[in-house]
Image (cartoon, rainbow, N blue to C red):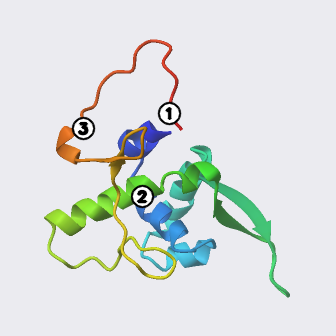
Amino acid sequence: MWTFLLLGCREGCLLLLREAFLGRTKYAEFLRIGVPTATLGARLQDLVDAGLLTRHAYQEKGERARDEYLLTQAGRDAMPILAALIGWGETHLPPVTAYAMTTGDGRPVRLAFVDDTGTVVDADAVAIAKKPEGAATPG
């Protein structure tokens, strides 16, 4: 899945994922953010195919049945990816972003590297290394 997000995600997928985290679920809500109609259905389907969203039928009174798109657990687990991008933007881009990572009561939070003892590790001390054969995945 992460390869989908980082390498195979077509234009707009991460934007739609962000909108899902903001509580958008309906096609019309996603459409309001400016994704062209011809593109929106395909990108939502990409996210469903990747297991990040699930399609769920709903029907409002007097309306035809429609689909809404809900985050799956895999989708919710992708939040650190978006948090990392938001954090990078806060550090390296002009302060124009309308989004920040906060707790439910509005306190700012940041992404951090934490070792297996719970100690925060400075990003400069972190390296990417190949896992040994047969090593268990943390978490």
Give the image location of residue 95, x and y in percent.
Answer: 18, 77
Give amino acid for label 2.
Leu
Q: Is residue 65 left or right of residue 126?
A: right
**What residue occupies the far bottom of the structure in this picture?**
62
Foreground of the two, 11 or 94:
94
Q: Residues within 10 Å of mark 1 (few under 14, many from 20)?
A: few
Q: Earlier in the sequence, mark 2 or mark 1?
A: 2
Amino acid of disc 3: Val
Task: Name the outermost residue toward the right.
Answer: 62
- Say if 121 sits above or below 62 in the image: above
> Which residue is located at x 54 percent, y 67 percent?
20
Residue identifier under label 3: 126
Residue closest to the eye, 33 or 5: 5
Q: Are marks 1 and 3 in contact (CB under 8 Å)?
A: no
Position above or below: 42 against 98: above
Q: Which residue is mark 2?
A: 14
First in residue order: circle 1 vs circle 3: 3
Left or right, residue 89 beside residue 20? left
Q: Earlier in the sequence, mark 2 or mark 3?
A: 2
Give the residue displayed 59% in from the left and 48% down from the top: 74
The residue that appears at 18% across and 65% down in the rendered structure is 91
* Marks 2 and 1, how far apart at CA: 25 Å
Quarter residue 61 falls in: bottom right
Residue at image x 35%, y 47%? 119
Mark identifier at residue 138: 1
Which element type, helix, strand or loop, lies under badge 2?
helix
